[in-house]
């Protein structure tokens, strides 16, 4: 894939480890130019593979902040042969560990906590452990928790759950659940989903691969009924907590695979306008899920939120084959200073 040919202005990276740890690729150019580059790369990939008209692309949505946005860090704690403890990031494709004392794309609360984290983790590390994978996280409330040493060390008490506010509702998540890393951009993506289609009084909303229920809860007021489908048990536990916390009687949670539950839900909703959002893992959709979406004649609109342009491209080809047409593509910069890009695609029946 070619890189845009514009001459980019060079700036001094904020992080002294830039170019070493492998986490960031764009700290050496201004944020505005990073957005130009990411948008151009995405357009080139999708237009080359899918032959899409240029009018389906909307401008990239920037993150409110280009630094200090990540609510989670995953670090490795390792004991060397001489007994010294190191904490940091494993360098991609190697067995080398880069020690880290600060990370400028992580939330400031996490950065302030890193010295405490290392001290606490070293004290807790059993003598027979040589390596531990640590998770440290924070929410809107600013409390920092960590885990990763010992069985069930990522489990949290309900009173300790992290939360962020979207559309006036608290969405709770935990150390052991997937949740978007950049909390500051969530309102923008929910607002975009709201504004792209007409929500009628009898609209039913499907939140597929729903995780802890972020979109199902944020958009609950737009739909007469909501069904969330998720197969990860820890995420289902948090989703049930979120629904109960907000007393959303019209929101239902189904535990299991999307391709298992979706046909029965659509049969039940056959006479009702239905909208779905899919937010699958980085690997994208299973072939069986695509076939089910092709047969889902009751769906009027389908939103696909992807963190991988490559798997998104593949899945859009398959969705086109089973009757879906791309209407809009909106990139969202969930991960400033890195190569990663989140993409929202709105599809309708062709």
Image (cartoon, rainbow, N blue to C red):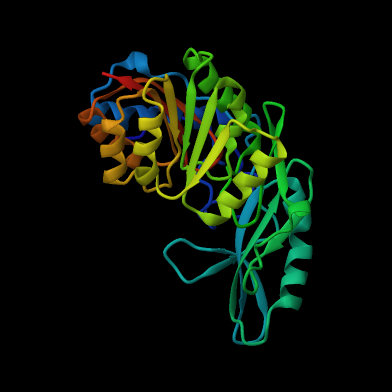
Task: Answer whether residue 16 is visible to the viewer in this image.
Answer: no
Task: Say which of 191 and 94 sits in front.
Answer: 191
Q: Is residue 137 above or below residue 187?
A: below
Quadrant, the C terminus: top left
- The spot of residue 271 in percent (x, y) is 38, 20
- The spot of residue 284 in percent (x, y) is 36, 44
Quadrant, the N terminus: top left
- The spot of residue 125 in percent (x, y) is 69, 78
Task: Say which of 321 and 257 sits in front.
Answer: 257
- The spot of residue 57 in percent (x, y) is 39, 19
Residue shown at 65%/61% (left/top)? 100
Q: Is residue 278 above or below residue 177?
A: above
Q: Quadrant of residue 189?
A: top right
Q: Is residue 13 left or right of residue 119?
A: left
Task: Answer whether residue 127 is visible to the viewer in this image.
Answer: yes
Residue shown at 24%/33% (left/top)? 317
């Amino acid at each position: 894939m070619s890189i845009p040919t514009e001459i980019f202005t060079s700036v001094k990276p904020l992080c002294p480890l830039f170019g070493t740890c492998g986490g960031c690729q764009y700290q050496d150019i201004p944020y505005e130019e990073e957005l130009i580059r990411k948008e151009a790369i995405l357009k080139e990939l999708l237009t080359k593979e899918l032959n899409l008209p240029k009018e389906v692309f909307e401008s990239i949505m920037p993150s409110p902040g280009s630094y200090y946005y990540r609510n989670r860090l995953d670090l490795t704690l390792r004991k060397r042969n001489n007994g010294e403890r190191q904490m940091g990031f494993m360098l991609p494709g190697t067995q080398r560990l880069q020690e880290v004392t600060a990370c400028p794309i992580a939330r400031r609360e996490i950065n302030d906590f890193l010295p405490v984290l290392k001290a606490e983790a070293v004290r807790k590390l059993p003598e027979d452990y040589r390596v531990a994978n640590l998770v440290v996280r924070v929410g809107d409330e600013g409390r920092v928790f960590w885990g990763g040493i010992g069985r069930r060390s990522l489990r949290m008490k309900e009173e300790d759950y992290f939360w962020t506010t979207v559309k006036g509702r608290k969405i709770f998540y935990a150390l052991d659940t997937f949740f978007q890393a950049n909390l500051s951009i969530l309102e923008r993506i929910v607002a975009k989903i709201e504004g792209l289609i007409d929500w009628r009084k009898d609209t039913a909303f499907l939140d597929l691969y729903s995780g802890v229920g972020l979109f199902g809860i944020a958009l609950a007021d737009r739909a007469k009924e909501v069904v969330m489908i998720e197969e990860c048990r820890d995420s289902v536990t948090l989703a049930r907590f979120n629904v109960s916390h907000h007393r959303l009687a019209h929101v239902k949670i189904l535990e299991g695979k999307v391709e298992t539950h979706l046909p029965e839900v659509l049969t039940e909703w056959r006479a009702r306008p239905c909208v779905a959002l899919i937010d699958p893992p980085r690997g994208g959709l299973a072939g069986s899920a695509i076939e089910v979406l092709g047969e889902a004649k009751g769906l009027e609109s389908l939103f696909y939120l992807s963190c991988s342009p490559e798997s998104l491209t593949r899945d859009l080809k398959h969705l086109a084959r089973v009757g879906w047409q791309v209407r809009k593509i909106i990139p969202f910069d969930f991960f400033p200073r890195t190569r990663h890009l989140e993409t929202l695609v709105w599809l309708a029946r062709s």
